[in-house]
Image (cartoon, rainbow, N blue to C red):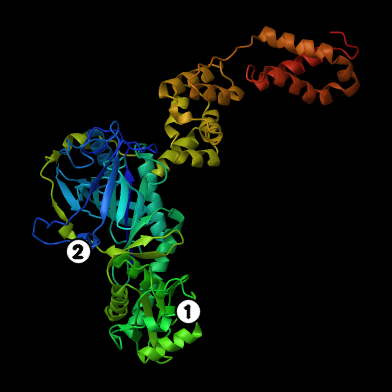
Amino acid sequence: MKAGLEIHQQLKAGKLFCRCPSVLREDAPHFTVSRKLRPVASETGARDLVSEAEAAKGKTFAYEAYRDTTCLVEIDEEPPLAMDRDALEIACAIAKSLNCAIVPELHTMRKAIIDGSCPGGFQRTGLLATDGWLDVGKKRVGIQTISIEEDSGRIISAEGGRSVFRVDRLGIPLVEIATAPDIATPEEARQVAERIGAILRLTGRVVRGIGSIRQDLNVSTEEGGRIEIKGVQWLDLIPLFVANEVARQGALISLGRKHGGAKTGRRLADVTAVFESTQSKVLGGKRVLATSFPGLAGLMRETLHEGKHFGKEVAEYVRVKTRAKGFFHTDELPAYGVTDREVAALRKALGAGEKDLVCIVADEPSALEVVEWRISALAEGVPKETRKANPDGSTSFLRPIAGSARFYPETDVPPVRTAQFVTKAKTAETPEERMAALKKLGLSDNLAKGLLLSEDYPLFTMAVSAGVQPTLAAATVLETLTSLRRKGTDVDRIADLAFGALFAQISKGFVLRDSVPQAIESLAKGESFSAEVVSDAAVEDAVNKLIDEKWDFIAKTGRERALPGLMGELMRTLRGKVDGARLKAALERNLLKHGEDGSA
């Protein structure tokens, strides 16, 4: 096997071709625009098969938009502006971190996409860098290309022939990183994805969270074909996706050797009469069509990989290419309300024996044409196609694999000379460099590993720079902020300036460790926080007053055994105002001053 990765990562910048903010919204949109999309030829005059296939579905698309955070550029009613400078700088930093050669002049292209996710029928993209590499363990993996492009709209709903998209995501800048097909094992694919993800996070300038990074897998085998698996969101499932695809290709090749070139006995037969009184909800009261495949009984039950058989895969083609939701076949009948008697009558109507496969469908003859095509295509091996990643590690047919015919020039965006952005861009630390720096500060392995890829790492460096002890700074970032987020506290709304002021107070001893959560919570609510500083004299007074009140108990119990209880009472009174170590020292010192009879 060989495999490569395509990683799409959102950047922390404004939208790529307008000056709108990169924000996603859940409130009601202000207006909706409806469109139908049609394919166009590329600059060479070639037609893109993917676009043609999408156009054949005849769908209508609706686009939800906002007046204050989206604009006419997103809905393709106004020309694009110049490419966002921050996005270009971040993309160049990523390219440098992956040892790539950055092109001297970046040209924007249009990539035809008429599945509805782009209102103009295309996505803007530009080749930024080539010929890079990264080391994963002892292996060097090539980086073929890095592109900068705009994200597509996000799907809100799809029903019948109408899909609804929201354009708030459309235009958010992305980098697309394509590796060479150097990956040789399923586990290696996960390791490469993890390494690239770590480098992206270490820039500190990429978006985090669900949907902000999307991974596509390209997998091929020696006798199979290249399959693109789209939308892998789960890092730990990458080895399973690769292993399942290798198994699927192997199984398809074996089926091709065994059954390739099979033809139907009859093109199509109307068998409605067989199911005139059927209890099947799918077939009852509908025109039922059938076709037979001589000698292919059991084909649909053939296993492609664990949890996936050939019949299920054929049904995926039927659902994508036709209006039918699926089909029935004799490898699974009787079932779904179809009886043994009806199966026997069906075979008799087609002149099919027990060794023959019979497939039936309600009201959609094109579905059986797809079934026949897919069975006949077994002779060709593994079709090159794009497949959708499913949460269980399996894939399903999405569309034919795209080619270069979908690209044509973007004449509304001038070329960009990259030299100024390359000079300004800073190469990210490697994971090893950051880990060594954290360990040098005296952090434990757990704290250092937690901080390594934390999105709050900049707050940690801010705290240490302000003089906060590194262990306390790490605990604040990894534990306190996490705990407050789980409670629903919006700590992300706190400005860096406010955090800086808080860290300065902590370093000077004005805010104690126990008070940090309370201080951050106050800042998140927009309230000021000032710590109450307790003087040494006040501490001494509080300690001596408690000893006097509790002396009978102390004398009876003994000073050493009474210490924890006394400490607990003092902490309840002075928590957050006095450091615990300072309070314990004062208590121990004053207990020693008191005699066994209660006198000083």
Q: How far across and down, in percent of the image, does residue 259 sit? A: 34, 85
Q: How far across and down, in percent of the image, does residue 172 sit? A: 29, 40
Q: Residue 267 is drawn in which quadrant?
A: bottom left
Judged left or right of residue 7, residue 81 is: left
- Of tags 1 and 2, the one toward the viewer is 1
Depth order, front residue of 292/574: 292
Instruction: Looking at this view, name the residue that lies furthest to the left.
Output: 44
Quarter of the image with the N terminus in it: bottom left
Residue at (36%, 50%) from the top-left corner? Answer: 157
Depth order, front residue of 365/272: 272
Looking at marks 1 and 2 on the same chain, the residue that comes earlier in the sequence is marked by: 2
Residue at (34%, 67%) from the top-left corner? Answer: 319
Q: Amino acid at mark 1?
A: Val
Q: Residue 244 is drawn in which quadrant?
A: bottom left
Q: Which residue, given by chain and number where applicable, does mark 2 sit on?
A: 49
* Residue 118 in sight from this viewpoint: yes
Q: How far across and down, in percent of the image, does residue 333 sit? A: 47, 80
Judged left or right of residue 486, residue 13 is: left
- Which label is found at residue 338? 1
Q: Amino acid at mark 2?
A: Leu
Depth order, front residue of 448/340: 340
Q: How far across and down, in percent of the image, does residue 254 sit? A: 36, 81
User: How far, Cα to Cα, is label 1 from label 2?
Assistant: 38 Å
Neighbours of disc 2 within 10 Å: few (<14), some (14-19), many (20+):
some
Quarter of the image with the C terminus in it: top right
* Residue 1 in sight from this viewpoint: no
